Image: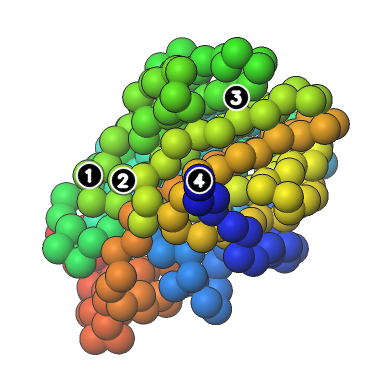
């Protein structure tokens, strides 16, 4: 008998403001982040009102993790202390490894129109938290896309998509947390059964429509956390757009203070001293 992953919990994001006043929905973040290990935060942003996004994210520091920004609509410019400059456009991805330290800015490259997308924070293992910082932009044409026999459109940002018939490696691979990040567009009446390794933490965020997973209904704006073993069966009677986020838990202590994520309070205090003394990126 086939074992299926079960929906353990569902979560509704909370309205928040970050950067210089960007309005967003914080889907994951804050208390209880160990439940989502290796993922630390998921923000959804989306507005056609420039007042909600125009101030952007002026220069700010990070240490100890990676950020993945996936743009659905709009244009955002990245600059950092390493000299990297990148323009994130609709359908593109920015993957930044803060590691021992990076100072960057993310500013809108538009004065009007829709700005819509997601930012996901992925933890780094303790042994890599003080490694070299890095940054890479992926243009839309660099990110693999496919369509299943049932018409489900799949954008394979990270990891490897496999539904038993189609297999496709994503744009990004990470060995320790093995992140899987797919954007799934399910037309009405379609089904999908992606194969994921047992032991992975699996999250499904429905950002349009309604999704059914093993008999559970997940509505728009809800994140479902699934059990760690078994198959997944999902479908949508009316159509849905879903982020599938999965990764191997690090099972290490998580201590976060704002933009710094380490394994102990002492390491956080060191990060604060390094930032104060302008040694964060040294």
* Mark seen at residue 2: 4
Residue 78 visible in the picture: no
* Mark seen at residue 178: 2
Looking at marks 2 and 3 on the same chain, the residue that comes earlier in the sequence is marked by 3
Q: From this view, report whether residue 238 is shown above or below residue 56.
A: above
Q: Nearer the viewer, residue 33 or 197?
A: 197
Looking at marks 1 and 3 on the same chain, the residue that comes earlier in the sequence is marked by 3
**Are discs 2 and 4 less than 8 Å apart at CB?**
no
- The kind of secondary structure element at disc 2 is loop
- The kind of secondary structure element at disc 1 is loop
**Are discs 2 and 3 less than 8 Å apart at CB?**
no
Mark 1–mark 4 Cα distance, whole angstroms, equals: 28 Å
Q: From this view, report whether residue 223 is shown above or below residue 46.
A: below
Looking at marks 2 and 4 on the same chain, the residue that comes earlier in the sequence is marked by 4
Mark 1–mark 3 Cα distance, whole angstroms, equals: 28 Å
**Callout 2 environment at 10 Å: few (<14), some (14 to 19), or many (20+)?**
some
Mark 2–mark 3 Cα distance, whole angstroms, equals: 25 Å
Please state which of the two labelled residues, at mark 3 or mark 4, is closer to the viewer. 4
């Amino acid at each position: 008998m086939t074992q299926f992953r079960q929906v353990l919990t569902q979560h509704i994001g909370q309205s928040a403001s970050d950067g210089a006043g960007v309005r967003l929905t914080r889907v994951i973040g804050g208390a209880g982040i160990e439940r989502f290990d290796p993922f630390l935060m998921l923000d959804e942003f989306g507005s056609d009102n420039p007042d909600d996004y125009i101030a952007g994210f002026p220069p700010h520091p990070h240490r100890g993790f990676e950020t993945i920004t996936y743009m659905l609509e709009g244009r955002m410019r990245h600059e950092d202390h390493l000299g990297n400059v990148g323009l994130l456009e609709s359908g593109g991805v920015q993957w930044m490894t803060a590691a021992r330290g990076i100072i960057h800015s993310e500013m809108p490259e538009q004065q009007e129109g829709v700005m819509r997308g997601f930012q996901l924070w992925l933890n780094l293992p303790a042994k890599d938290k003080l490694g070299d910082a890095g940054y890479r932009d992926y243009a839309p044409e660099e990110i693999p896309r496919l369509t299943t026999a049932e018409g489900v459109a799949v954008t394979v940002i990270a990891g490897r998509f496999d539904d038993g018939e189609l297999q496709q490696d994503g744009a990004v691979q990470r060995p320790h947390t093995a992140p899987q990040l797919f954007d799934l567009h399910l037309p009405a009446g379609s089904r999908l059964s992606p194969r994921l390794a047992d032991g992975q933490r699996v999250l499904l965020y429905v950002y349009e429509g309604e999704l059914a997973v093993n008999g559970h209904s997940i509505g728009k704006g809800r994140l479902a956390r699934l059990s760690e073993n078994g198959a997944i069966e999902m479908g949508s009677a009316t159509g849905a757009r879903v982020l599938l986020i999965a990764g191997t838990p690090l099972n290490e202590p998580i201590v976060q203070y704002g933009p710094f994520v380490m394994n102990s309070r002492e390491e956080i205090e060191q990060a604060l001293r390094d930032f104060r003394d302008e040694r964060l990126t040294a």
